[in-house]
Image (spheres, rainbow, N blue to C red):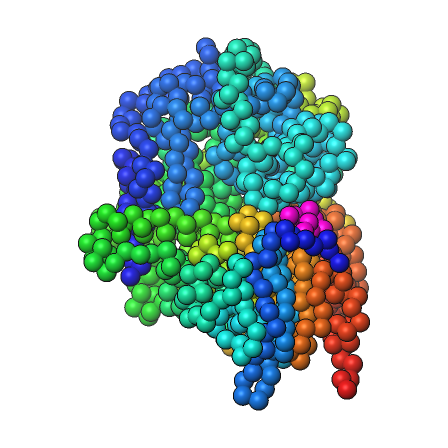
Amino acid sequence: MLDLRKVNEIFARQVPLKSVNAWIRLRGAVRAERTDEGGDTVLAQTQTGVGGLASIPALLHRNATEFGNAPAYREKEYGIWQSWTWAEAEKEIEALALGLVNMGVAEGDFIAIIGRNRPYLYWSIVAAQCVGAIPVPLYQDASAEEMAYVLGHCGARFVIVADQEQVDKVIEVQDQLHQFEHMIYLDPRGLRKYDHTQLHQYSHVQAQGRAAYDEHIKELTRRREKLTYDTTCVMLYTSGTTGKPKGVVLSNRNVIETAKSSAEFDKLGPNEEILAYLPMAWVGDFIFSIGQAYWCGFCVNCPESPDTMMTDLREIGPTYYFAPPRVFETQLTNIMIRMEDASPFKKRMFDYFMAHARRVGPDILDGHSVDFMDRLKYALGELVTYGPLKNTLGFSNVRVGYTAGEAIGPEIFDFYRSLGINLKQLYGQTEATVFITAQPDGEVRSDTVGVPSPGVELRIADNGEVFYRSPGVFVEYYKNAESTADTKDAEGWVATGDAGFIEEGTGHLRIIDRAKDVGKMADGRLFAPKYVENKLKFFPNILEAVVFGNAKTECTAFINIDLTAVGNWAERNNIAYSSYQELAGHPQVMDTIQSHVEEVNASVAEDEMLSGCQVHRFVVLHKELDADDGELTRTRKVRRRIIEEKYADIINALYDGSDKVSTKTEVTYEDGRKGFISATLEIRTAGTNAMRAQMAAE
Amino acid sequence: MLDQTEDGYITVDGRKIGGVVMEMKNITLRFGGVVAIKDISFDIREGEIRAIIGPNGAGKSSMLNVISGFYNPQEGEVWYHGKPRPRMKPFQVAQQGIARTFQNIALFEGMSVLDNVMTGRLNKMDGSLWKQAIWKGAAEREEVENREKAEQIIDFLEIQAIRKTPVSRLPYGLKKRVELARALVAEPKLLLLDEPMAGMNVEEKEDMSRFILDVNDEFGTTIALIEHDMGVVMDLSDRVVVMDYGKKIGDGTPDEVRNNQEVIDAYLGVAHD
């Protein structure tokens, strides 16, 4: 009775939306969409960045004028993709900018923006730039205290937030913020009873802006025209593995030059589709969803909610996609779990064709010569396995895919490449406006991070630390001249804090570890924890690992199991467990982890330089390391110092030879309350290998 | 006692509560020789969150079933909007703008979340079989309108990610939320919740509490709920009726009820004479 007609959304696009089972609101007719964009690729590449295109608002105006009817933003809401053209986006942004002028935003003010990826918040960023203010996007999952620091540090007078949750956090710390004046919120839900003297609804601000058009448009135009290549484009706070976050100031020059050269590097045009789902406070999202999107004029798609991201990805079918290694890992784990449950026929077909793809897939992708029969078989595999799989994952249209932030497991990397997905690695940081190195098409490997991006110079210091210089190099750390001077020297060279080397022959950069984490063991051998941790984390059963051993005689490790993978294994083997803690301490789980550790030890022993880093003793932790407990950064990087302090008792036990340790750990629940969990953990000793050189000598 | 007039009262958090929507007048309900409810009277006012609490077997669910029209009391009357309510079939009660959820979830397990939610719109669909068969025109418009309402509720309760998932595959806490969605999509004036938090963990309870408050705030829905978890009840409700052995032993704000000696005795298990 309730079977709905499946109505395809009428986007006249070159690549139709995949499986859009969305329904259409018949009354709110579909907006006019782009018809043909044949000639615009040239346009994006011939513009030089100077001559009126010195700011994001200027690029917005160009896009709205030259391809005003092309979609600029889409967001799925109420089950369908709502879209805005460039011309419409410009109007929305202008209304908001006028509203901001109306509310008294002055040039040079800081405006904080907090929330998940939504078109309205991207408009807030650009509207802030239009009025000469500096947008400061914040991580939406930051705690109130973390926000208090950032808001206080930049002295934000205005805050634009998504919903009640964020409003509550800002109100909680309001008393500490002397410069804070007004807050604008997007979703009015639950906010009706709040005191509205400092609180304003986004749509009302826009409405007031539209109403005061005549009064303020001159002022707005004047401010917009004042923006130059050296005006601050955005300020982004680094998540900070140590100490307080630092505000990285990026100019229009940084952002536009980087967007321009990286778009040329990967031949990005106005017909790209991207899904904006990574935190808005992260430099990558800023460059992809604003820098490159405005430079090239392509469409930014926002998911319906964080939970629907995978469905939305499949519906949009992005052509240009970025994800941290973790996302690829999770997806691969899910595929493997589902294949375990598939029918024997499907499973055999999958195994057969995947084996073939592993053999020839990457070569075909890189354009190397491949035997005709192998190509034929690969084409058949594409038809029955790779194609459907890519469609399920939402990767059918991916032309350029990037991963960065952490090392990616070679098997994971090769899996995606063998399917024919052009997944590449890049290396970058906030201070470089993302791009330092990237892998060109056809030169992709899992163990390097590529060659210097256009315009970037590289230098390796004597201690192995990587330095770079480029047009993307940040202006300064806000109100922190000391750190600026520490990081960037007078000639513009910036220290990355990572140790690495340039591979001879190929010119590719390889990163070993954080320079400050690379240490010496008691006997003088090199200690590179991340190198070992990454190898451990490549096992699907291991979610997180922390290796200790600086100035010690041997290395030890903390290990977190991956609940999805291990839980599924437990289910298949009829192993009952009632909690994460119980599963983590299960003897069979311990055995599996031990075998993984021993495999890693064998592989580490092969490298003469790093053979001292073999893990002698390890413990499987009773709780997941969590950003809420301060153990990880918001970008899920391990905070060693904090972990060392918090778990000092367990670390001691790892070194004093005992075979178990009782511990009590403080945990923070989702709502901010704290509690304790106590556990007795078993300590295992893993087999290690003597160094190859020694073995040969004996 | 709250400052109660004919026109209502102002709650602790400053919400304005209106006049009486529903009034129980000396309700007695028997099952054979068992007296489930004995001479109970209380009222429910417009816009308030009204809780009915009590120990096991106190007659809470029977009371909710009287309100929802599923049971007809042997004595006493239910007044709705200033008129005594005649005996009714449950669907007639639903047409009066009363919707409910159940203690033991009652969803269509094989159907998707969306389809389950759409069934809540049944009362708003009046297209004849003939119109449905022709489809074009009236029936299609109606479907689109109903879908739009359903999507708004799905968005409101943040269940977009499971829109197409069969209900049987969902965990308990989400099923409860889907049931709430189905009740809400009927745009009820009075919403009855039978143990909305039963069997939930702390986080799920918090989510559910937030949704209940938001429903009340956003749609102005009057809510009557039965709940075991005292903490939740005291936080959520504006006024509480306490029942024990089918009798009303307390009625008032959470604070008044909390300090009522008879209520304390009932919960701590003082021997009855």
Horizontal and vertical percent position of residue A527: 68, 48
User: Relative to residue A495, is residue B154 drawn left or right?
Assistant: left
Q: Residue at x 49, y 42 (%)?
A: A277
Horizontal and vertical percent position of residue A512: 60, 42
Using the image, determine if residue A559 lies above or below residue A218. below
Q: In which quarter of the image is the C terminus of chain B?
A: bottom right
Using the image, determine if residue A83 lies above or below residue A352. above
User: Relative to residue A14, is residue A163 drawn left or right?
Assistant: right
| Residue nearest the observer in this picture, A319 or A468 | A319
Q: Which residue is drawn at 37% across and 65% down?
A: B111
User: Relative to residue A571, is residue A69 drawn left or right?
Assistant: left
Q: Is residue A534 visible?
A: no
* Residue B205 lies in quadrant: bottom right
Tell me how many marks there are: 0
Q: Which residue is drawn at 54% across and 54% down?
A: B221
Horizontal and vertical percent position of residue B78: 54, 68
| Residue nearest the observer in this picture, A314 or A398 | A314
| Residue nearest the observer in this picture, A479 or A618 | A479
Q: Residue at x 65, y 48 (%)?
A: B15
* Residue A653 lies in quadrant: bottom right
- Read off the magenta span: B9-16
